[in-house]
């Protein structure tokens, strides 16, 4: 089963959901506002993709927490992602043993069609 983590009002998440719906690909959606991913799951994603991809440095949450001004280690970044899942770049798509972060039409077509 394919799992999508994000928030419903995010444009990238909307595009991903539309892609999967259009191509009749079954998925389970997890709203990170109401279903906070467990820390071990975030650590698992970080082991499969770079933290550069996983941490949304353009988010309002990132700016409000002034994380750019701190010298964060990778462990610190993971700890922040566990505390503040809104720092995740969205959507996070988990399938088989793979993880895709963000929406990229051509990448999705290559992976799922």
Image (spheres, rainbow, N blue to C red):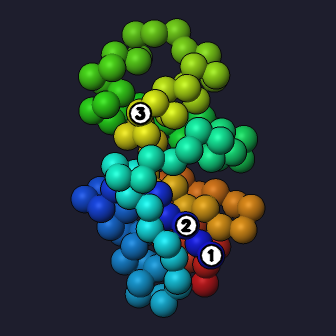
Label 1 to label 3: alpha-carbon separation: 26 Å
Q: Residues within 10 Å of mark 1 (few under 14, many from 20)?
A: few
Q: Nearer the viewer, residue 58 or 10?
A: 10
Looking at the picture, does residue 27 appear above or below residue 60?
below
Residue 23's spot in the image, x, y percent? 48, 88
Question: Quadrant location of residue 69?
Answer: top left
What residue is shown at x 53% (from left), y 85% (from top)? 25
The vertical placement of 54 against 14, above or below, is above
Q: Dot 3 corresponds to which residue?
A: 84
Q: Which mark is first along the chain, 3 or 1?
A: 1
How busy is the neighbourhood of tag 3: few (under 14 within 10 Å), some, or many (20 plus)? some
Residue at the spot of label 2: 3
- Cβ atoms at labels 1 and 2 below 8 Å apart: yes
- Report the disc number at residue 1: 1
Asked which secondary structure carries label 2, the reply is strand
Q: Looking at the image, which residue is at 55% across and 61% down?
A: 93
Across and down, in percent, residue 40 comes to: 65, 41
- SS of the residue under disc 1: loop
């Amino acid at each position: 089963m394919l799992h999508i983590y994000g928030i419903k009002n995010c444009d990238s998440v909307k595009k991903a959901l539309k892609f999967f719906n259009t191509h009749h690909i079954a998925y389970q959606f997890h709203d990170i506002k109401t279903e906070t991913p467990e820390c071990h799951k975030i650590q698992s994603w970080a082991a499969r993709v770079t933290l550069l991809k996983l941490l949304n440095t353009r988010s309002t949450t990132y700016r409000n927490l002034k994380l750019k001004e701190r010298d964060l280690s990778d462990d610190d970044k993971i700890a922040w992602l566990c505390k503040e899942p809104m720092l995740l770049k969205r959507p996070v798509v988990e399938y088989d043993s793979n993880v895709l972060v963000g929406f990229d039409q051509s990448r999705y077509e290559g992976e799922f069609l």
